[in-house]
Image (cartoon, grey):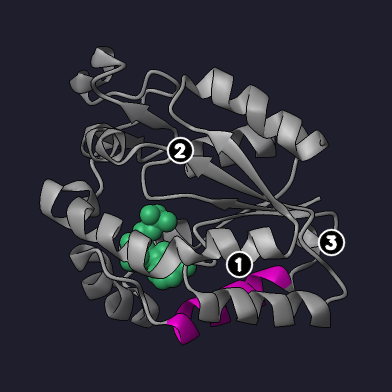
Amino acid sequence: MNVMLLGAPGAGKGTQAAKIIEAYGLPHISTGDILRKAVADQTQLGLEAKRYMDAGELVPDEVVIGLVKERLSQPDTDEGFVLDGFPRTVVQADALGDVLTELSKELTAVISVDVDSQALIDRLTARRTCRMCGAIFNVIAQPEVASGVCPTCGGELFQRDDDTVETVTNRLNVYERSTAPLIDYYADKGVLRHVDGNRDVADVWVSVDAALKG
Ligand code: AMP
């Protein structure tokens, strides 16, 4: 099963990707995670990507396309994968189509997680991530995480550098301009399924799972 999650920053793609991975045992390909690791490791890629990420801008297409090409050619993706945060532009979507054709693969489902824009701002600025296990929390919905300790593994929770109000606003504008057109792009290909993401994680998951089975 080759799945792609589409949706604005804060729509819950990462959270639902974790659910899909747990249920179906597929590898998670998150370009945001790959780039954040490169930044943390201070690689050449990380140094280049950081200024775009801190400003809420997209990293250049050729850089992320190269990363995804390499990742999709690894054997653990043979049984399927979950793409999260890629593609984000029509150029990236076209490149993905070419790579999948080369690998004789195709997308099984593109799931658009739809969330109202005010809710996105609230969610992003309240988001906390565990440095150790990667779990994602919301400090408003789960006030206990304000302590900075991960309830799952005891690791340290942090706020992403790009989850500040200013950067979030820019990321949402970039999404509307560059990524939202992919909804029509994949609808035209007949693989798009919409899920209402304005609900509890568990309820959204029921719909995502139904969309994957449908
Ligand atoms: P995310 O974790 O998916 O919200 O990504 C965080 C940041 O990484 C984005 O705001 C971009 O700066 C960069 N990024 C992640 N994926 C892509 C992509 N497919 N194309 C360009 N930039 C990306």
Magenta residue span? 61-72
Side of 133 relative to 25 (left or right): left
Side of 60 relative to 149 (left or right): right
- In the depicted structure, whether residue 23 falls above or below residue 179: above
Q: Which residue is mark 3?
A: 78
**Around disc 2, counting alpha carbons within 10 Å, would you say few (fewer than 14), some (14 to 19), or many (20 or more)?**
many
Q: Main secondary structure of the magenta part?
A: helix
Instruction: Provide residue 191's location: percent of width, then percent of height.
Output: 74, 55
Q: Kindly identify the residue that appears in the image at 65 percent across and 75 percent down.
A: 96
Dot 1: element: helix
- In the depicted structure, whether residue 181 falls above or below residue 82: below
- In the depicted structure, whether residue 38 falls above or below residue 208: below
Q: Amino acid at mark 2?
A: Gly
Instruction: Provide residue 74's location: percent of width, then percent of height.
Output: 74, 69
Side of 113 relative to 164 (left or right): right
Depth check, mark 1 against mark 2: the one in front is: 1
**Dot 3 or dot 2, earlier in sequence:** 2
Q: Kindly identify the residue that appears in the image at 56 percent across and 26 percent down.
A: 204
Q: Nearer the viewer, residue 2 or 21?
A: 2
Q: Which residue is mark 1?
A: 185
Marks 3 and 1 in Cβ contact (< 8 Å):
no
Q: Which residue is mark 2?
A: 12
